[in-house]
Image: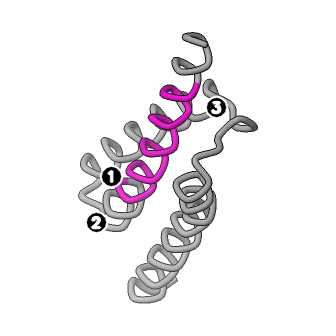
Amino acid sequence: MNSFLGEIIGYLSGACTTLAFLPQAIKSITTKNVSGLSLYMYVIYCIGLVFWILYGVYLHSFQIILFNSITLVFNVIILCMIIKSSVGNKKK
């Protein structure tokens, strides 16, 4: 595979996997409802994204660093909402 095609595939795959979380982030933010989302899934996923970013730094891969960083932001927002919701429910 030539280098240019590999770069294009890297950007397309990164964009798709990053954009996949955007609807959930928008829905969670607008409805403020995260009751059906798993805290543990988002914690594990965020940890995985941090490792992907570190791997991207190791490889000097801009696509891996960029798209996983954006995805991490979306997921941390949702994770914070889940934590806030679970703390709020325990106080009631």
Mark 1 and mark 3 in contact (Cβ < 8 Å)? Answer: no
Say which label, 3 or 1, has the lower sequence index.
3
Relative vertical location of residue 86 with respect to residue 45 in this rendering, above or below? above
Left-right relation of 18 to 51: right
Q: Which SS class for mark 1?
A: helix
Mark 2 and mark 3 in contact (Cβ < 8 Å)? Answer: no
Q: Main secondary structure of the magenta part?
A: helix
Q: Amino acid at mark 1?
A: Gly
Q: Is residue 76 magenta?
A: yes
What residue would you read off at disc 1? 56
Q: Where residue 28 sits in the image (x, y, percent)?
A: 59, 52
Left-right relation of 48 to 62: right
Say which label, 1 or 2, has the lower sequence index.
1
Name the quadrant containing residue 92: top right
Q: Residues within 10 Å of mark 3 (few under 14, many from 20)?
A: few
What residue would you read off at disc 3? 41
What residue would you read off at disc 2? 62
Residue drawn 45% across and 55% down?
Answer: 71
Q: Nearer the viewer, mark 3 or mark 1?
A: 3
The stretch of residues the image draws in magenta is: 69-85
Name the quadrant containing residue 30: bottom right
Mark 2 and mark 1 in contact (Cβ < 8 Å)? Answer: yes
Q: Amino acid at mark 2?
A: Phe
Name the quadrant containing residue 45: top right
